[in-house]
């Protein structure tokens, strides 16, 4: 059952007011989860970019909420940080986005949107479907790493170093986050859409 069918059925059942509240709550939940993921950070030697759980929640927001709501959750997270709420790893404020991790953060809404599109388009049937979903979500996670490493290269002037220190050390962790996202999306996407 696709997203449009589920939403049409719920609308016909008169669930619109409840769906609106559920959508607002879901967006807020994933914005908060991304902020919590920022606090779960591990420094990486030789790079200003830590390992965090943020990418997990970025991917999950799109995979479970769909493209628009997933991206909205990440925009809400960024808006909170820009407004001065200390939701980023090292603080808050618009100037923080100009620092070494700004490229990663700005890629969050894009990655969440693409994750939502991927889960909508990839058939979730059989091992082949699971493998394809995993591969597509892993490619989606690279949006964050490429955005971050590119910005790091711009501000340092050392693109090779930015790739070595801002991209490569995070691939293994992304594989684990994508595996978890694949499992959750595989089993939970349709259930969440019934609420939204």
Image (cartoon, rainbow, N blue to C red):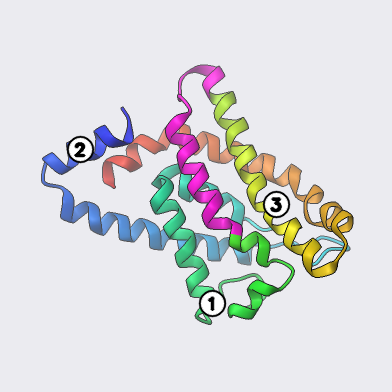
* Label pair 2/1, CB-CB below 8 angstroms: no
| Image spot of residue 136 (x, y percent) | 59, 33
Residue at image position (39%, 53%) is 69
Asked whether 135 falls inside the magenta stretch, the response is: no
| Image spot of residue 40 (x, y percent) | 64, 62
Residue stretch rendered in magenta on the structure: 107-129
Label 1 element class: helix
Mark 2 — residue?
Answer: 8
| Image spot of residue 4 (x, y percent) | 28, 36
State whether residue 141 is above or below residue 44.
above
Q: Main secondary structure of the magenta part?
A: helix
State whether residue 111 is above or below residue 138.
below
Tell me the distance, in whole angstroms, between the alpha carbons under discs 1 and 3: 21 Å
Mark 1 — residue?
Answer: 82
Residue at image position (58%, 50%) is 56
Label 3 element class: helix
- Residue 4 as seen in the image, left or right of residue 106: left
- Residue 111 as seen in the image, left or right of residue 10: right
Tell me the distance, in whole angstroms, between the alpha carbons under discs 2 and 3: 36 Å
If you read the primary sequence from the N terminus, does the residue marked by circle 1 or circle 3 appear first?
A: 1
* Label pair 1/3, CB-CB below 8 angstroms: no
Mark 3 — residue?
Answer: 145
Mark 2 residue crowding within 10 angstroms, few (<14) / some (14–19) / many (20+): few
Given residues 177 and 115, the one toward you in this image is 115
């Amino acid at each position: 059952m696709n997203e449009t069918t589920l939403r049409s059925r719920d609308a016909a059942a008169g669930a619109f007011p409840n769906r609106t509240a559920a959508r607002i709550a879901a967006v807020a939940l994933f914005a908060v989860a991304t902020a919590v993921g920022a606090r779960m950070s591990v420094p990486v030697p030789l790079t200003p970019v830590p390992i965090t759980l943020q990418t997990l929640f970025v991917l999950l927001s799109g995979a479970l909420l769909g493209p628009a709501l997933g991206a909205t959750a990440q925009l809400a997270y960024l808006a909170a940080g820009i407004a001065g709420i200390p939701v980023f790893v090292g603080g808050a404020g618009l100037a923080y986005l100009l620092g070494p991790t700004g490229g990663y953060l700005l890629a969050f809404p894009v990655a969440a949107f693409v994750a939502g599109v991927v889960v909508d388009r990839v058939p979730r049937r059989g091992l082949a479907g699971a493998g394809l979903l995993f591969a597509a979500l892993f490619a989606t996670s690279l949006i964050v790493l490429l955005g971050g490493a590119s910005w790091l290269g711009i501000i340092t002037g050392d693109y090779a170093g930015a790739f070595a220190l801002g991209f490569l050390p995070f691939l293994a962790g992304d594989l684990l986050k994508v595996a978890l996202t694949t499992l959750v999306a595989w089993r939970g996407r349709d259930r969440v859409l019934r609420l939204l």
